[in-house]
């Protein structure tokens, strides 16, 4: 990781936070897990490296910085990430739009308890 990046944990991480599980060109975000306040590359890395379940971010806390751009190191709020059209607002690096299908692992989705 670059010196200005917060610590990111994962399995076989590269310099842009890609991991063993998700390593495509646009798989360059890390998520700060609510349960342990640590960035992980993905839910599978969290499961491999911890002994507890992921706690999802409640919608009322989506103003917290919990997304890290692996290209430039900027931290985004959950709202910024979800409304950002799958690119970093700071460096314009592209994020994987398929990550949308994984939101429920990390974020309380509207209408869910």
Image: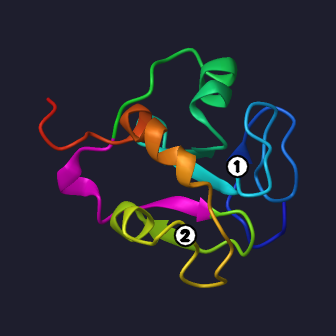
What is the total number of numbered labels drawn onto the structure image?
2
Residue shown at 44%/65% (left/top)?
81
At mark 1, the secondary structure is strand
Q: Identify which residue, 13 or 110, lies in the foreground.
A: 110
Residue shown at 57%/45% (left/top)?
38
Q: Is residue 38 above or below residue 47?
A: below
Magenta-tinted stretch: 57-68
Q: Where, quadrant-wise, is the C terminus in this rendering?
A: top left
Expressed as whole percent of the image width and height from the top left, the position of residue 60 reads: 17, 54
Which picture quadrant has residue 12? Answer: top right
* Residue denoted by label 2: 75
Q: Could you tell me how far apart the alpha carbons at marks 1 and 2 are, in whole angstroms?
A: 12 Å
Residue shown at 74%/36% (left/top)?
10
Taking the view exactly as shown, the residue that stands out farthest to the front is 98
At mark 2, the secondary structure is strand
* Residue denoted by label 1: 8
Q: Is residue 103 above or below residue 97?
A: above
Expressed as whole percent of the image width and height from the top left, the position of residue 18 reads: 78, 47
For marks 1 and 2 on the same chain, the one whose residue lies earlier in the sequence? 1
Q: Is residue 23 left or right of residue 101?
A: right
Q: Identify which residue, 81 or 35, lies in the foreground.
A: 81
Q: Give residue 44's mark.
A: none
Expressed as whole percent of the image width and height from the top left, the position of residue 19 reads: 79, 39
Q: Is residue 100 above or below residue 55?
A: below
Q: Is residue 66 magenta?
A: yes
Residue shown at 62%/54% (left/top)?
96
């Amino acid at each position: 990781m670059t010196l200005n990046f917060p610590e990111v944990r994962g399995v076989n991480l590269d310099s842009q936070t890609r991991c063993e599980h998700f390593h495509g060109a646009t798989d360059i975000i890390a998520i700060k897990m609510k349960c342990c306040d640590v960035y992980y590359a993905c839910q599978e890395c969290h499961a491999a490296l911890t002994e507890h379940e992921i706690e999802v971010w409640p919608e009322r806390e989506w103003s917290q910085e919990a997304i890290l751009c692996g290209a430039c190191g900027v931290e985004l709020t959950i709202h910024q990430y979800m409304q950002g059209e799958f690119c970093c607002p700071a460096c314009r690096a592209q994020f994987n739009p398929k990550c949308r299908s994984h939101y429920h692992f990390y974020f309380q989705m509207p209408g869910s308890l």
